[in-house]
Amino acid sequence: MRKKEESSLVIPKSTLSRLPLYYSHIQKMQQSGEEYVSASAIAQSLHLNPVLVRKDLAGVSSTTGKPRLGFNITVLMNDLSNFLGYNKIDEAILVGVGSLGRLLLTNKEFSCMGLDITVGFDKDPDLHGLQIGDKFILPMEKMANYVKRTGVKIGIITVPADQAQEVCDQLVDCGILAIWNFAFTLLNVPQGILVKNENLPSSLVVLSHQLAKKMVKDNNLNITKTS
């Protein structure tokens, strides 16, 4: 067990980003009644390199796969859940209850991934006291007291970019240690504060460029076929 704990400290970010994909895929297999799954089968379904998948799973699995069968799905699901922290719940608060904020507040999938967004904060007085799903919306003035009282350490920012740094500073001052940032801007934080930026514009640019390349490729293929 000690070896697993040490390896988790140095696991590459690229591997961490793939593990939830494996978990989701294996979960669907388990729900369909499958008992075993191989790294090769996972790789084929997710369009990944089998060697890469096998290496990723070796870093988190407590057992090796059986020849011609692969990993026991129940055991592998438990190993992934433990490694990813899905078997425990981290509480978070959300600031900015606009369209995106409401979507995150009502997303029931987060609980399966070990995250519970307990409450939303917003400066709009018309939202104060409202309940969205099962989450209440509170004024910003109550945030510091709430964080102190509950000990929550994760803050989610879903405000416009020009308000994000101010909100970030408030979260840090309240005692928040990790920030999930959905605002379209980079944040300046003190040393020791963790920030994960969800850069939607960059993702859209990448998708648009990939689409443009695909259309050019498909067009060239069509020209070749008709020539």
Image: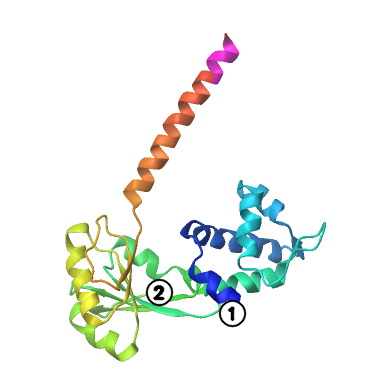
Residue 191 in the image: state x and y as whole percent.
26, 71
Image coordinates of residue 180 in percent, x first then y, are: 34, 66
Instruction: Classify residue 215 as left or right of residue 58.
Output: left
Residue type at mark 2? Answer: Gly
Report the residue at 64% width, 74% height from top.
78
> For residue 135, which quarter of the picture?
bottom left
Dot 1 lies on which element?
A: helix
Label annotation for residue 44: none
Q: Is residue 86 visible?
A: no
Which tag, 1 or 2, sits closer to the chain's start?
A: 1
Q: Main secondary structure of the magenta part?
A: helix
Horizontal side of residue 78 vs 162, given as left or right: right
Q: How is the image coloured?
A: rainbow
Q: Is residue 61 toward the left or the right of residue 14 in the image?
A: right
Residue tagged 2 = 133
Q: Which residues are magenta?
A: 221-226
According to the picture, the residue beneath numbered tag 1 turns out to be 2
- Pointer 2: residues within 10 angstroms few (<14), some, or many (20+)? few
Badge 1 vs badge 2, beta-carbon distance below 8 Å: no
Look at discs 1 and 2 and give the one toward the viewer: 1
The residue at the point 39 percent across, 41 percent down is: 206
The quadrant the N terminus occupies is bottom right
